Structures are given as C-alpha cells and as structure tokens.
Amino acid sequence: METLLKGDWIKGHDNLVITGPTGTGKSWLSCAIGHQACRDNLSVLYVRLGKLLDELSMARGDGRIAVRLKSLARIDLLILDDWGLEPLNANARHHLLEIFEDRYGNRSTLVTSQLPVTKWHELIGDATYADAILDRLVHIAHRVTLEGDSLRRPHPQTA
C-alpha cells in the first residue's frame, strides 16, 4: 500500500485495479490514493462508472463528446468506481475503448470493482471490444484484491 500511495505508478502511467466484495474499502482506498495524488499536484477525477457513461451518452447526443473525451484524456489519474454493476451496451463499450485508448501509456486509471478481473470479459459483452479494452487497462495494471466482511456492517458493542 505504501508503494501505491507514493504514486510512482501514476507518474509511470500504469493503472491500478482494486477488487473485492462490497464494503471492503475499495472506494475509500481509491479516494485516499486520489487525495494523495492531489497533494502531489496531479489532476484527479473520481466518478462512478455508470454516471460517467450516462454523461458521455448525453454528450454524444448534444455534440460535446469530443470535448469531453479530450478532457478525460488530460487527467493524470482517472478513478472509475463501481466497474461491473451492470453489463455494458454498445455505446458504453465504445466510450470506454476511446477513453482507455487515449489514456494508454499517457495517463493512469484506477478502477474498483466487486467482480474479479476474470469476469470482466463477459461483462463487456463483445469479445473484440473486451480484448481491446482489457488489453489497454489491465496490461499495465497493478492489482489489489481486498478480502473480508463489509466494514459497513454494525460490529457488536464491547462492554
């Protein structure tokens, strides 16, 4: 964890994938890494993946898609939270490929997911897109798998 917080992987344009069950601290950890990157004067954007994909669909409809994709390509660390909550449609696959293509080798992306990486190919839903997206995202990614019970569950009070 100390190595990840130092941020050398961000400066080296690597990616980070954090997986684990609900409530194990994936989002919290990604935010901590993002805050440290901000303190290191790097630009950071944290967004839930579903919200970003909705935003990109709207931008495509009103002609702002090129500008939005260009702005995403310039962010030093893009944090995509909650990868895999729902299968991707054709537009989502296309947008993700564009994002990862622009960022590959130039900027870093951090993805959190409840699903193990082995399930992502199926989630993406199209073999060609899945190969292309995962090659650009996972090929140069550090991986952290969190385990344990949800930290949100109430713990018994000790007297």
Image (cartoon, rainbow, N blue to C red):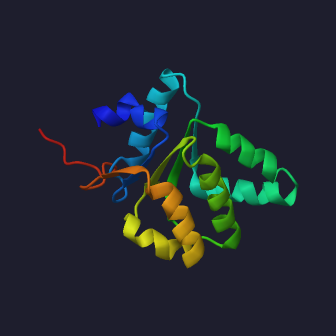
Image-quadrant location for residue 148: bottom left
Residue at image point 58% right, 55% down: 49
Is there any visible trace of residue 39 in the rendered image? yes
Is there any visible trace of residue 125 in the rendered image? no
**Residue 36 locus on image (x, y percent):** 44, 27
134 up-or-down from 102: above or below: below
- Is 36 in front, or is 23? 36
142 up-or-down from 61: above or below: above
Residue at image point 40% right, 32% down: 8
**Residue 43 locus on image (x, y percent):** 59, 30
Residue at image point 55% right, 63% down: 133
30 up-or-down from 120: above or below: above
Q: Quadrant of the N terminus?
A: top left
Q: Quadrant of the C terminus?
A: top left
- Is 43 in front, or is 20? 43
Q: Is residue 86 left or right of residue 150?
A: right
